Amino acid sequence: MPENKNPQSDAKTQVVDALPVDALAGPLPAAVDLRRWVALIVLLVATFMDAVDVTVVNIAVPHIQADTGASTAQIQWVVGGYALAFALGLITGGRLGDLYGRKRVFLAGVAGFTLTSLVCGIAGSPEVLLAGRIAQGAAAALMVPQVLSIIHVSFSKEERGKVFGIFGAVSSLGVLAGPLVGALLVEGDVFGLGWRPIFLVNLPLGVAGLIAGAMLIRESRAEHAAGLDVRGMLLSATGLLFLVLPLIQGRELGWPVWTQVMLVASVPVLALFVAYERRVIARGGSPLVVLSLFSRRSFSGGLGVQLLFGLASGVFFLAWALYLQLGLGFSPLKAGLSGLPLSLLLMAGAGVSMQVLVPRFGRRVLQAGALTAAAGMILFAWLTGHYGTDIALWQTMLPLVPMGIGMGLIIAPLTDIVLSEVPHEHAGSASGLNNTTTQLGQAVGTALCSVIFFNHLGGDGNPAVRSAKMPDAFAHTLPYVAAAFLAAFALLYAVPRRAGRRDANAVGGSQAEGQATERPDHDAALVR
């Protein structure tokens, strides 16, 4: 384990920096304990910055489209391209942190995220903006998986539940605060820059994060980190691109033959990826995806729920932002404020779920959350269909109350559930998979907007027709969102039922798959 090269004034801090990661399982000197909690703030700011950028564009879509002349497909790529690049690079980003140092890769990701934010902010055409967004997603893929990995190795097993709860709440708040942040920046027209400050605001945050991160974060890496699986990365990227590209472009292009061929081909390509990973494991190599992790109910079931929530978010937020602004004529600020109940109640639900309800009632809390969120979407569909363009602001806010509570009850405990049985050496890969699943769901959900929302909307060449049909198209979309929540309810039966602790003799890896076997480094609470 390399020593931290940043000079420190406290001798005790220098000593602990040179210790193996496992040494942090015991009590820490007071100065070091304070330092890692301050470093957590840096990590959470980076998490919030990334989470905001997932949805901040949605509220600015009408302004970006009017200013740059972007087509519907280009707008979907600006929204979904970030999530797709993020998803494709997250597993490799986590592996790079394990190999070359999580602090080093985290700082490289922050630097790249800051630079690409500048590119997006000064873009003069939709093509440049799209390229900047994809590059921004790739930079985030280096930055974000290191956050969970650094938390995983810096905090003891007793602390991780609380820290993961904070992480989940901050991440969720960032995603939900994105529309309001975007609305304030767009409507404020800072320095006459219109929508551009939604990206440029990352510049001071990124620079501050680089400085603070270099000073506060302790370097760590996996003692037996696996190498990079380049072929696996290319196969997975190809399969996912074959899936998402035709979903976004197909409707606008009239579904040419190549889009249909790519959709069909995505299935065997992804199957080939899984077969190749099994072959790598059988040969004792280092796969991109550690398949042994999926043998754990907490991991596989939790990832399934993450995927469904990503799908629901991808479909809902883009359609919701366009419905409010182009269908109802809301200003960006009014549209952003209408989502305030969602943000506030999600935070409240997350706090109550993680600290009070899940330890007592277990899986049933998460299932109740899924049903509550689905009920909110059904209510929204009825209100939209009943009132049309005459719907009031408070009526658009009402369905977001159960949706916010429901999502909060689920999202906060999910990260802890997914990573609770992960061996120390696979922390980077597991956190990469966790984030990849959510982002992939959002990318596919955004792509599905073409089929679910835009296809029902029609009237591409007539803005007046599109505006009049917005409420109906949005109401048509909401049952699909509700269906995703209901599917999450069913899938939650796959995760353990009650809060408990692992057996002390349990192992964290599978020798049959060629992975190093070791006891998990923590007994984090599970829903068993």
Image (cartoon, rainbow, N blue to C red):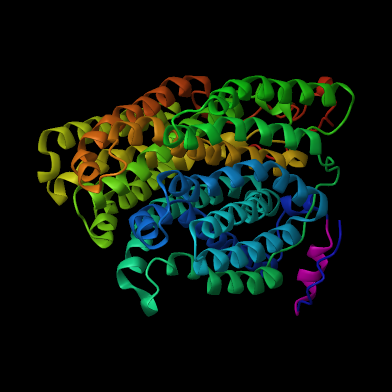
> Residue 41, percent across and down?
56, 64
Q: Left of 27 or right of it: where is 464?
A: left
Which residue range is magenta in the image?
9-19
**Residue drawn at point x = 75 percent, y = 80 percent:** 9
Q: Is residue 248 magenta?
A: no
**Residue drawn at point x = 37 percent, y = 58 percent:** 60
> Residue 325, percent across and down?
25, 52
Quadrant in which the N terminus appears: bottom right
Magenta part mainly helix, strand or loop?
A: helix
Q: Left of 307 or right of it: where is 503?
A: right
Q: Could you say which is closer to the camera, residue 348 or residue 50? A: 50
Q: In the current view of this chain or complex, which residue is farthest to the right?
A: 283
Q: Left of 108 or right of it: where is 301?
A: left
Q: Could you tell me if residue 8 is visible in this image?
A: yes
Residue 523 lies, with reference to residue 67, above or below; the image says: above
Q: On the image, which quarter does residue 387 sit in?
A: top left
**Residue drawn at point x = 86 percent, y = 42 percent:** 224
Q: Could you tell me if residue 528 is visible in this image?
A: no
Residue 429 lies, with reference to residue 480, above or below; the image says: below
Q: Could you say which is closer to the camera, residue 226 or residue 6? A: 226
**Residue drawn at point x = 50 percent, y = 44 percent:** 80
Q: Could you say which is closer to the camera, residue 339 or residue 492? A: 339
Q: Is residue 12 magenta?
A: yes
> Residue 440, percent across and down?
55, 37
> Residue 312, percent across and down?
40, 35
